[in-house]
């Protein structure tokens, strides 16, 4: 199978695979009222064999990186088995996960042993009380211990995701910089994105990542070269810091020009964009290995529908009610 490519000649080396939309945190910008099952009480998420088949289809079409997302992926009891299943594909060189971190201290060594190569953990404040207020969980010290555990078991550069929010953390750059001065972390500031359920909080708290970028540039931080299977972050380094800073700015004019990733939801739908319309069903082609060619053909054909941009600038958020729905 040839490389997956869309009508705009963008090639896709990166798959974000949601394994559940359940999350036990109640972050103000994502699930302020806690988890609610999407479309009723159906919790029939992709099973292990379906995950094995869909990742194989992508791997055979040139995908080099898979990120396991949620919800909170570690809530799956078979999460270690999921990691091992994806790692059966020798062409998948990077297998990452995004987590809220509450199980990292306990389980990160097992994840590493199963084949996980990279980890992202979400921390929106370095103040324990503010962390509690944002997430609805008093687990700041537990998550920080998990980061230390990840470093101890051999993850070279743990990535920390921080949603940038006006009047909550956008004035805290110096505090975050002090934290990464001697730690092998990549701290990534993510612009708050508007979703169907989050219009009010977006209007109150959105601030452009360009504010942080200007501050970094003034302090001598240098933009690094982006690899073909890297995520969308603009990564900056500084000779006086062990850690790095990443900026994810979806409202930047050229954000979509280098899109290299596709998404599959925990319900088995292919999503061409985080903020696109209803996804392309794949689950009917995940029942047996013999369906693999047809599965790849459907994925390849659907890429003709992928739009050039996400249209967030026009306030079009598509079907995405919250970021846990298809894994952010």
Image (cartoon, rainbow, N blue to C red):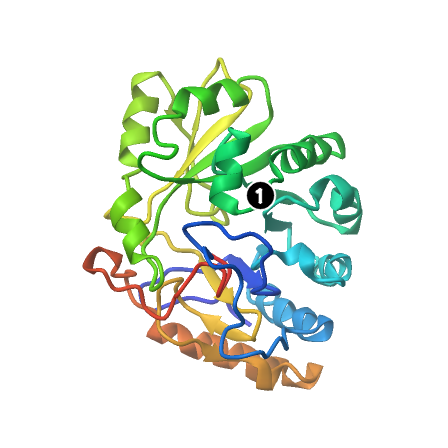
According to the picture, the residue beneath numbered tag 1 turns out to be: 120
* Res 3 visible: no
> Whole-percent x and y of residue 41?
58, 78
Q: Is residue 54 above or below residue 222?
A: below
Horizontal relation, residue 280 to residue 282: left or right: left
Q: Quadrant of residue 120?
A: top right
Give the farthest residue toward the top.
240
- Residue at image x 40%, y 25%? 172
Relative height, residue 118 to residue 39 (above, below): above
Residue sitting at 76 percent across and 46 percent down?
107
- Residue 60 seen in the figure: yes
Residue at horizontal 53%, vertical 63%? 35
Identify the image quadrant of the N terminus.
Answer: bottom right
Q: What residue appears at the point 49 percent right and 65 percent down from the top-left corner?
A: 326
Mark 1 residue element: strand
Specify whether 35 is left or right of 165: right
Q: Residue 249: give x, y in percent of width and height.
A: 33, 44
Rendering quarter of residue 174:
top left
């Amino acid at each position: 199978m040839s490389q997956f490519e869309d009508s705009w000649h963008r090639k896709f080396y990166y798959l974000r695979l949601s394994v559940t939309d359940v999350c036990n945190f109640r972050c103000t910008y994502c699930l302020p009222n806690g988890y609610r099952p999407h479309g009723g009480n159906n919790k029939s998420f992709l099973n292990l064999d379906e995950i094995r088949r869909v990742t194989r289809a992508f791997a055979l079409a040139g995908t080099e990186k898979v990120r396991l997302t949620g919800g909170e992926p570690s809530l799956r009891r078979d999460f270690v088995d999921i990691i091992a299943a994806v790692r059966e594909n020798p062409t998948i060189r990077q297998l990452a996960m995004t987590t809220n971190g509450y199980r990292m201290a306990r389980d990160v060594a097992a994840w590493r042993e199963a084949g996980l190569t990279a980890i992202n953990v979400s921390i929106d404040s370095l103040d324990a009380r503010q962390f509690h207020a944002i997430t609805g969980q008093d687990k700041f010290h537990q998550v920080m211990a998990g980061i230390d555990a990840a470093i101890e078991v051999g993850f070279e550069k743990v990535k920390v995701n921080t949603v940038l929010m006006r009047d909550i953390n956008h004035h805290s750059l110096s505090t975050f910089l002090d934290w990464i001065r001697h730690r092998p972390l990549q701290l990534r500031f993510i612009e708050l994105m508007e979703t169907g359920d989050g219009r009010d909080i977006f209007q109150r708290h959105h601030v452009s990542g360009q504010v942080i970028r200007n501050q970094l540039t003034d302090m001598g931080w240098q933009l690094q070269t982006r690899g073909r299977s890297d995520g969308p972050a603009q990564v900056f380094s500084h000779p006086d810091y062990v850690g790095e800073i990443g900026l994810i700015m979806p409202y930047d004019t050229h954000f979509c020009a280098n899109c290299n990733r596709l998404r599959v939801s925990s319900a088995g739908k292919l999503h061409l964009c985080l903020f696109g319309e209803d996804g392309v069903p794949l689950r009917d082609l995940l029942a047996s290995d013999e369906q693999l060619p047809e599965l790849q053909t459907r994925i390849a054909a659907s890429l003709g529908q992928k739009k050039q941009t996400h249209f967030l600038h026009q306030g079009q958020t598509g079907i995405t009610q919250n970021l846990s729905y298809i894994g952010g």
